Amino acid sequence: MSRIAAIARGLMANELTTSPLETKHRQLIKLIWSRNGMGEQYYRVLAPDMPYSRFESRMTRLMEQGAAEGWVRFVFPLAPTDDEAAYRMEFVDEDRFIHELETLVAPDEKAS
């Protein structure tokens, strides 16, 4: 394999990996919606038929979807700060959020 081909393959392989920025963004979303015990409170109140780790992962994806579709908004400060209130989540459409939560925790209705 030529040197150029090896470099090109290496660059193409890098394109297939998840961006560290995307991963960090997802982590920030998770930290914001679940902070101060809110994740555990949602889990206790909703009592989904799944382990907490799966619930947390699904909720994070749901919050990402909400942000993408505009029914939830995440607010970040322009520069990092230790003021946690500067990092927050705002519900633009609370009814949509509640509907999506109900769908998230509804038992699977697959026939056995």
Image (tube, grey):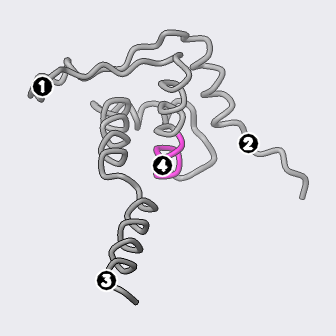
What residue type is disc 4 on? Tyr
The amino acid at mark 3 is: Arg
Q: Main secondary structure of the magenta part?
A: helix
Few, some or many C-alpha atoms within 10 Å of disc 4 (few <14, some 14-19, many ≥20)?
some
Residue at numbered disc 1: 79
- In the picture of the structure, the residue carrying the numbered disc 4 is 52
**Magenta part of the protein: which range?**
53-58
Tell me what residue is drawn at x 57 percent, y 38 percent.
47
Mark 3 element type: helix
Q: Nearer the viewer, mark 3 or mark 2?
A: 3
Q: Amino acid at mark 1?
A: Ala
Q: Secondary structure at mark 4?
A: helix
Query: Residue at the spot x=52%, y=30% of the render?
Result: 45
| Residue 55 counted in the magenta span | yes
User: Cα distance, mark 2 to mark 1?
Assistant: 41 Å
Q: Nearer the viewer, mark 1 or mark 3?
A: 3
Residue 22 shown left or right of residue 78 in the figure:
right
The residue beneath circle 2 is 107
Q: Which mark is residue 3?
A: 3
Out of 34 and 15, give the one closest to the viewer: 15
Q: Is residue 42 left or right of residue 25?
A: right
Horizontally, is 6 left or right of 87 in the view?
right
